[in-house]
Amino acid sequence: MKVSDFMSSPVIAVRPAEPVAHAKRLMLRHGIKRLVVLERGRPVGIVSMQDLARRLGGGTAGWRRRPIDSIPIANVMNKNLLSAPPRAELSSAAKMILRRGVGSLIVTEGGQLVGILTKTDLTRYFAEHLVGRIKVGELMTKRVITAERLHSIMRVVDLMRENNVGRVVIVDGKKPVGIVAESDIAFARLEEPAQGLTERRLRFVRKPATAERAKYRYVKYIALLTAEDVMTSELVVVEPGADASKAAGLMVEHKISGLPVVDGEELKGIITKTDLVRGIANLSD
């Protein structure tokens, strides 16, 4: 199979000077997670939900506190472009995506953008052409990053950053009850574009000396949102013995990037689009 057989085309694109708010609207309207950034008709970057979650949420630059309708896409886009020609083999494209640790590659011909190949496109290929080849348990990641319902969103963000993952499974004991993806956090941050996540201010009182009034010692800001507030609770799960092509089909059907793997109600692992892409790369060896 060639890249051209499964790439998405035409490509939805934005310009570097357009605001982040415009990118958000396009992603929501078209149900996609990334946009190609074009300047004078040539690709110069990619902006994804992951970029929004990470770049708007971290760092000290003053522009991060501005409303998202005044932050240019150029400030949050990823310039680390990976490209391939339409006639490249899908297995080679899968290996390139894994090697560079990116979610997609742009497809160019003669320097012009003709398509984009994402992990979703490769997942669709897996669902349609790799039936009966491999089981979920052979591809799944056994070490699952988890949090509890009432963990703060900031705790979930920290878990994602510390473990370099795009989703955290929310558990009640050993039972998965929800999942929080970076896209959930990206748009939670953008609900209050001038302030980021909803916060409350706590003032701690310093113990007064005799005849003195109590004085505030310092102010601390704590995020009010919890994992339960933004998690997807209608979980789609799969068992370790299921055909991995079934997992791929469920991801495409429900427009999700990962499935908790359960035995009964107990969490055993997680299978993601990245795991499926790795399966495509390995099966071609």
Image (cartoon, rainbow, N blue to C red):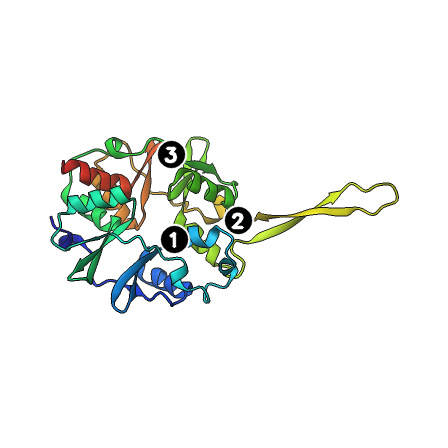
Residue farthest to the bottom, as pictured: 40
Give yes or no for contact between labels 1 and 3 (Cβ–Cβ under 8 Å): no
The picture places residue 86, in percent across and down from the top left corner, at 14, 55
Cα distance between the residues tagged 1 and 3: 22 Å
**Nearer the observer, disc 1 or disc 3?**
1
Task: Work out whether residue 125 can be spotted.
Answer: yes
Residue at 51% from the left image edge and 40% from the top image edge: 151
Q: Secondary structure at mark 1?
A: helix
Q: Dot 1 corresponds to which residue?
A: 51
Residue at 24% from the left image edge and 31% from the top image edge: 138
Q: Secondary structure at mark 2?
A: loop
Horizontal side of 81 relative to 147 (left or right) equals left
For residue 144, which numbered disc appears in the image?
3
Q: Dot 2: within a 10 Å radius of its alpha carbon, few (fewer than 14), some, or many (20 or more) residues?
A: some
Q: Is residue 196 above or below residue 13?
A: above
Q: Give whichever of 184, 67 is nearer the camera.
A: 67
Q: Dot 2 corresponds to which residue?
A: 225
Horizontal side of 213 relative to 24 (left or right) equals right
Sequence order check: which comes first, mark 2 or mark 1? 1
Q: Dot 3: within a 10 Å radius of its alpha carbon, few (fewer than 14), some, or many (20 or more) residues?
A: some
Sequence order check: which comes first, mark 2 or mark 3? 3
Quarter occupied by residue 33? bottom left
Amino acid type assigned to the residue bearing label 3 in the image: Val
Amino acid type assigned to the residue bearing label 1 in the image: Asp
The picture places residue 114, in percent across and down from the top left corner, at 18, 61
Give yes or no for contact between labels 2 and 1 (Cβ–Cβ under 8 Å): no
Residue at 52% from the left image edge and 59% from the top image edge: 62
